[in-house]
Amino acid sequence: GENVEQHPSTLSVQEGDSAVIKCTYSDSASNYFPWYKQELGKRPQLIIDIRSNVGEKKDQRIAVTLNKTAKHFSLHITETQPEDSAVYFCAASHQGAQKLVFGQGTRLTINP
Amino acid sequence: DADVTQTPRNRITKTGKRIMLECSQTKGHDRMYWYRQDPGLGLRLIYYSFDVKDINKGEISDGYSVSRQAQAKFSLSLESAIPNQTALYFCATSDPTPGLGETQYFGPGTRLLVL
């Protein structure tokens, strides 16, 4: 079955700097890669996703890149702000499996 | 997402007790999921259901059971609770885009403490 590894487990950056979180997956048939953000005491919510037919997707200050050959994908947050502090989860799935497999999560702290 | 609700939001119980966590959704989604969240372990799938007559085990189903009473309701039971089932439990729903993947919508979570 699919296995998703996420690094780092914790990340601390200065406000205004960029943050990068990386995930690797094992199943080459996976074709959907979402990222979820979980603020303290809240539910995970989708912030961006990418399908396997594209290599990069941007939405304002966040972007996700996908390298299908290497089987890894990354979340990039630029110009970080205090409200970016949260736990971020990557996940992977493919239509045949019909369920998401999540990474272990990254706790991102933005220092003012 | 207010369309997915969970009850109770917090629960303290004792070892050996039976407990049920409930999830309801008004999104009209066929697919529903139960996850548990533990620090450093992410979200792990307990059970999932793709329709009322379909129930599937996830990666950590031992010690849990589920019931899909209707399209909108999916309950998780701990038949005999043990302390290592202390965790944050999330219900989620999805309506996958055919051939492309799926987005999951999470409930607010139930924090369970087993003494």
Image (cartoon, rainbow, N blue to C red):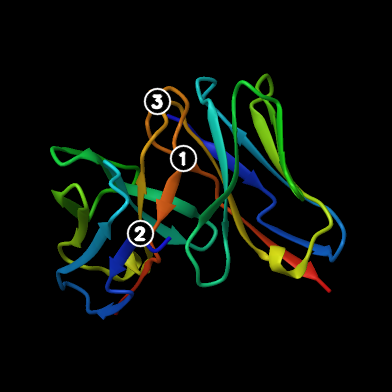
The front one of A4 and B91 is: B91
Contact, CB < 8 Å: mark 2 with mark 3? no
Q: Residue type at mark 2: give it.
A: Asp
Question: Disc 2 designates what residue?
Answer: B3
Within 10 angstroms of label 2, few (less than 14), some, or many (20 or more) residues? few
The front one of A64 and A27 is: A64
The front one of A71 and B62 is: A71
Quadrant hosting residue A112: bottom right
Quadrant hosting residue A87: bottom right
Question: Disc 1 designates what residue?
Answer: A101
Contact, CB < 8 Å: mark 1 with mark 3? no
Which residue shows up at 28% across the image and 47% down it? B28
Looking at the rendered structure, which numbered label has been put on residue B98? 3
Which residue shows up at 66% across the image and 24% down it? A54
Q: Residue B13's spot in the image, x, y percent? A: 24, 79
Secondary structure at numbered mark 3: loop
Mark 1 vs mark 3: give the one in front.
3
Q: Residue type at mark 1: give it.
A: Val
Mark 2 vs mark 1: give the one in front.
2
